[in-house]
Image (tube, rainbow, N blue to C red):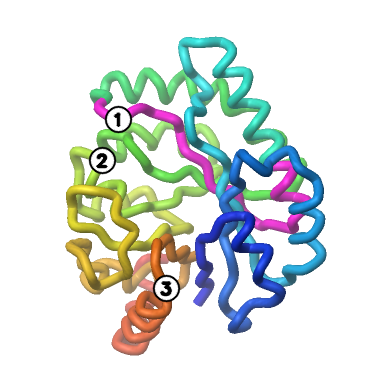
Amino acid sequence: MDLRIAVGLEEALRFSAPEDPWLGLEVYLDPAFLEEEAPFAKLASSYKGTLSIHLPFWNLDLVSPDPEVRNFTLRRLLLGLDRAAELGADRAVFHSGIPHGRTLEEALDRADRLIQALKPVVRRAGTLGVELVLENTHEPEPRALAPILEAYPEVGFCFDAAHARVFSRVPEPGPWLALEPDHLHLNDTDGLYDRHWNLGTGVLQHRTWLGPYLDRTLVLEVGVDPAPSIAFLRSLRESLPDRALTEGA
């Protein structure tokens, strides 16, 4: 199982080695430290486990109507990819930047423009050997992301079931899973807010749909001790017949 724990940069600096050989990290590139050299040099030299990164996303939008926001967003994403390469990360997760409450028509119009705006980001990722992974956030439904993933086959899909439940008009996992995620952000929620609870403590019913995706990259995005979620995933894996682990492939 490729399981990673989502942490901030400061927390990642406290990990000198993975607790288990199969356990890695996904490090959020906190904008407060993005331009500082020392933390990244320290993490690159001290952490030797599997690593992915989450690119900055707060207040960023590659297709903002404000050209200064567009240009700033591009610079932040490109610098984030450079940092990912410095850390030896294999993947970089990013958001589309879509605001909440957009219609499907508005989202599809944004997708067309985002396809063009992403060109330098996708190019930089390819040059650096870092796989880009697009996460669902405030998109109203999966069709809002499909054109982007079709335009860039080299970009993967990160499925966040809590985002789908809380922010979209398609709360059930099935239609989103049809986009074939190879990266999943896992946590639980009450269905009203993006709670980042441990698995099995909310309404997302991971046991009913997650089994075929246990062979993908799984990232625990929980705001508390993740040990119960790790135990949940081990229990789920042990409860499934071998064939169930490959049905989502």
Res. 78 image quadrant: top right
Q: Point out which mark residue 225 bears.
A: 3
Q: Which residue was labeled with disc 1?
A: 100
Q: Position of residue 10 (x, y in %)?
A: 63, 57
Image coordinates for residue 24, horizontal then vertical, percent? 59, 70
Residue located at (45% from left, 33% from top): 96
- Circle 2 SS class: helix
Q: Residues within 10 Å of mark 1 (few under 14, many from 20)?
A: few
Q: Amino acid at mark 1?
A: His
Of labels 1 and 3, the one closer to you: 3
- The magenta span reads 81-101
Tag 3 and tag 2, C-beta contact below 8 Å: no
Mark 1 or 3, nearer chain start: 1
Position of residue 174 in the picture relative to residue 71 (left or right): left
Residue bearing mark 2: 167
Q: Which amino acid is tagged 2?
A: Phe
Label 3 crowd bin: few (<14), some (14–19), many (20+), radius 10 Å: few
Horizontally, is 191 left or right of 161 in the view?
Answer: left
Please determine whether, in this image, residue 19 is positioned above or below residue 84: below
Say whether residue 154 is visible.
no
Q: Would residue 54 appear left or right of 95 to someone viewing this image? A: right
Residue 46 horizontal/vertical position (percent) = 77, 68
- Can residue 27 be seen from the camera position used here? yes
User: Tag 1, which secondary structure?
Assistant: loop
The residue positioned 58% from the left and 43% from the top of the image is: 55
Q: Quadrant of the C terminus?
A: bottom left
Q: How far separated are the C-alphas under marks 1 and 2?
A: 7 Å
Q: Measuring 48% from the left and 28% from the top, which residue is drawn there?
A: 59
